[in-house]
Amino acid sequence: MSETSYQQQALAGATGVELIIALYDGAIRFLYRAMQCVEEEDVRGRRIAVKKVIDILTYLQARLRPDLGGPVAASLADFYATMFTMTLEASHLESKEQFEEVIGFVRNVREAWVVVARDPEAGRVLPRELRTREERFVPQAEVYAPVGEAASSWSA
């Protein structure tokens, strides 16, 4: 079994909180990759890693439900916006130290999610499905169609 299919299997049975933790893990992994690219003076690699971090932060922020989460959702929105800005700044300055600072903040919030994951009530409150209602009804081919190409309405 390949590593990718193993990861897909592991995530298939994950709760909503476990999926959030997995996204934090991905952001941390890509932040480390960006640091490595700074060391190696790999501008393209750094930009790719930073884009992945930004994509994860944007995804997490877009899924917040202020109507249900209240002040906690507002705090998380501020956190994601701050990490977004700090990540871009670290990349612009090619600063390993600033990437390390972002990693520290993301790890701290990730650990808070680990505590939440241990609470059986959290599993009942947070949805398993992280896609929005609208996303669930968009055929996957439309979501991933390359720009300029018509999307197919069927999938294998």
Image (cartoon, rainbow, N blue to C red):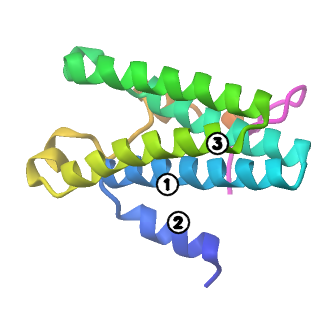
Q: Which residue is mark 3?
A: 97
Mark 1 sits on what residue?
25
- Dominant secondary structure (helix, strand or loop) of the stretch shown in magenta: loop
Residue furthest to the bottom: 1
Residue plotted at (63% across, 47% down): 31
The residue carrying mark 2 is 8
Magenta range:
144-156
Q: Is residue 96 above or below residue 39?
A: above
- Type of amino acid under label 3: Glu
Residue type beneath disc 1:
Asp
Q: Is disc 3 placed on a helix, strand or loop?
A: helix
Which mark is in front, 3 or 1? 3
- Residue contact between numbered discs 3 and 1, judged by CB atoms under 8 Å: no
Picture coordinates of residue 35, whole percent (x, y) = 72, 50
* Residue 99 horizontal side relative to residue 14, left or right: right
Q: Secondary structure at mark 1?
A: helix
Apparent side of residue 152 relative to residue 10 in the rendered image (left or right)? right
Residue at horizontal 51%, vertical 30%? 135
Nearer to us in this view, 114 or 5? 114
